[in-house]
Image (spheres, rainbow, N blue to C red):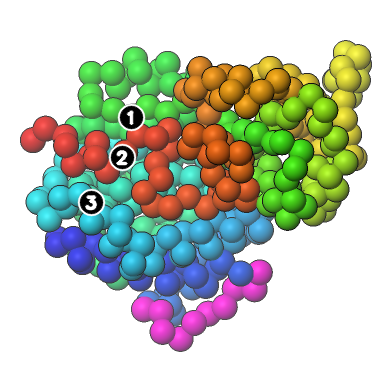
C-alpha cells in the first residue's frame, strides 16, 4: 500500500473521530460508512466508561479531540516527510499498550501502520474497546489494512520487534521476555513544572490543565512543581480553582480523602484547597489528588537536577528558558513528531533489519 493511501485512511479516521470530540456527539453528513459506525462507536464509548471509571465522558472527548486535530493531512504530511516511507516495510511489530488514559497507545498504533508495517497489539484490560473499534472503521475506509492489524489477549508470538509500555515493575518483565528482539521499552515517567512566582494568572490556569487532565494519570501530567524558597502559593491555588469540579468525581474524591487521611495520621505537613493536596517531597511520582513540590535555590541548580533525573521525566513545563521546556497547558497536546521518552519511534521502525 502506498504511503499516500495510508495517510488518507488516517485523515478519514480523524474526520470520523471529530464527531465524538465535543460535549454533544454530532453525526455529520459527509463521513463515509457513518450509518454503520456512528451509533456503534457511541456505544463503544459508553461501554469504555463502564469498564474503566477513570474514562469519563470528558476525558474520552478530549482524547478524540486531540487525535482528530493530529490526524489532519498537513500534520501527517509534515510528520512523515522526514522519513523514507515509500520503501516497503513488512515487519511484524508487537505493541503492548498501557491503559491509564484513553487511547494512550494510539501513537504507537499509528506509527506502526503509517510506516507500512504489520501490527500485533496486546491491549490493556483498562482500555480494550476504543482502539479495536476505530480499527474497524480504518479497515472500512482502507480495506488494504485488512490482515495487517491483529489484537490478541494471548501471549505475543511471531513478531520481529516490540514496543512495550508499562510501569517500572512490568518493564523488568518486558526486558526479560523481549530483550532478544529490537525493542522500545517504556517505564514510569512523570512531568514537572518549574515556577518563578512571576507567572501570569493565565499561565497558572493553563498549568492546572497539565495537572488535572485525565485526573493526573498520564505520564505527561505535571505531578511535581519546583518553586523558589520565597514562593507564595496564593496565585497557584487561585488558578487551580478552574478544576474545582473534579471533587465531584467519586473515584477522585475517594483518592483525595484517603491520601489526606494517611498524610494527616503520619503528621505530614500539607497545603490543601479541598480538592488538591500539596506535599513537599523529593520524589516525582505523586498519588492521585496530590502534587509534590520542592524548593530550589537557583535555576542552575534545578536545571542540573533535571538533567540528572532526565530518565524519570517526560515533560518540563516552564517559561524560564530551561532546556526542552514546553509552554503551560501544552503537555497533553503533543505533535505527531514529539515522541514519548524522546525516542523516535518512526526511526526505530524504518531501520529494522530485513
Q: Farthest residue toward the bottom?
A: 29
Report the side of 270 relative to 296 (left or right): right
Which disc, if any, is residue 184? 1
Considering only vertical position in the picture, is 42 above or below 252? below
Position of residue 176 relative to residue 195, above or below, is above
Q: Is residue 26 covered in magenta?
A: yes
Q: Nearer the viewer, residue 87 or 17?
A: 87
Between 152 and 19, the one nearer to me in the picture: 19
> In this figure, which residue is indicated by the disc labeled 2?
345
Residue drawn at (59%, 73%) of the image: 25
Whether tag 1 and tag 2 are in contact, CB under 8 A, the answer is yes
- Residue segment shown in magenta: 23-32
**Image location (x, y in percent) of residue 99:** 52, 40
Give the residue at x 9% y 51%: 87
Q: Residue at x 24, y 40 (%)?
A: 347
- Quarter assignment of residue 9: bottom left
- Residue 322 located within the stretch drawn in magenta: no
Horizontal relation, residue 250 to residue 274: left or right: left
Can residue 287 be seen by looking at this rendering?
Answer: no
Nearer-the-camera pick, 133 or 290: 290
Q: Secondary structure at mark 2?
A: helix
Query: Which residue is at a point 91% across and 14% down the rendered structure image?
Result: 267
Q: Which residue is mark 3?
A: 82
- Label 3's element? loop
For the residues labelled 1 and 2, the Cα–Cα distance comes to: 8 Å
Q: Do residues under tags 2 and 3 come within 8 Å of each other at their CB atoms? A: no
Using the image as rendered, state which of residue 94 and residue 186 is in the foreground.
186
Amino acid at each position: 500500500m502506498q504511503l499516500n493511501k495510508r495517510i488518507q485512511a488516517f485523515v478519514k479516521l480523524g474526520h470520523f473521530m471529530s464527531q465524538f470530540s465535543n460535549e454533544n456527539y454530532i453525526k455529520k453528513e459527509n463521513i463515509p460508512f457513518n450509518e454503520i459506525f456512528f451509533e456503534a462507536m457511541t456505544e463503544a464509548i459508553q461501554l469504555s466508561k463502564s469498564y474503566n471509571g477513570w474514562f469519563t465522558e470528558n476525558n474520552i472527548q478530549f482524547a478524540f479531540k486531540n487525535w482528530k486535530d493530529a490526524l489532519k493531512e498537513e500534520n501527517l504530511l509534515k510528520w512523515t516527510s522526514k522519513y523514507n516511507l515509500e520503501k516497503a516495510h513488512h515487519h511484524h511489530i508487537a505493541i503492548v499498550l498501557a491503559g491509564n488514559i484513553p487511547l494512550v497507545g494510539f501513537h504507537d498504533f499509528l506509527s506502526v501502520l503509517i510506516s507500512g508495517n504489520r501490527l500485533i497489539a496486546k491491549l490493556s484490560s483498562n482500555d480494550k474497546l476504543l482502539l479495536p473499534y476505530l480499527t474497524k472503521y480504518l479497515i472500512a475506509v482502507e480495506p488494504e489494512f485488512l490482515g495487517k492489524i491483529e489484537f490478541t489477549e494471548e501471549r505475543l508470538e511471531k513478531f520481529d520487534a516490540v514496543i512495550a509500555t508499562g510501569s517500572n515493575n512490568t518493564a523488568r518483565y518486558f526486558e526479560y521476555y523481549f530483550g532478544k528482539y529490537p525493542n522500545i521499552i517504556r517505564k514510569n515517567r512523570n512531568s514537572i513544572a518549574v515556577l518563578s512566582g512571576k507567572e501570569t494568572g493565565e499561565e497558572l490556569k493553563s498549568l492546572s490543565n497539565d495537572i488535572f487532565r485525565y485526573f493526573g494519570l498520564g505520564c505527561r501530567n505535571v505531578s511535581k512543581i519546583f518553586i523558589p524558597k520565597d514562593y507564595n502559593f496564593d496565585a497557584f491555588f487561585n488558578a487551580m480553582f478552574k478544576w474545582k469540579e473534579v471533587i465531584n468525581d467519586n473515584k477522585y474524591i475517594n483518592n483525595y480523602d484517603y491520601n489526606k487521611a494517611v498524610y494527616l495520621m503520619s503528621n505530614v505537613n500539607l497545603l490543601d484547597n479541598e480538592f488538591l493536596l500539596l506535599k513537599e517531597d523529593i520524589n516525582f511520582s505523586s498519588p492521585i489528588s496530590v502534587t509534590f513540590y520542592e524548593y530550589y535555590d537557583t535555576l542552575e541548580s534545578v536545571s542540573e537536577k533535571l538533567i540528572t533525573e532526565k530518565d524519570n521525566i517526560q515533560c518540563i513545563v516552564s517559561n524560564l528558558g530551561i532546556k526542552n521546556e514546553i509552554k503551560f497547558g501544552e503537555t497533553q497536546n503533543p505533535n505527531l513528531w514529539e515522541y514519548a521518552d524522546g525516542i523516535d519511534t518512526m526511526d526505530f521502525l524504518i531501520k529494522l533489519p530485513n
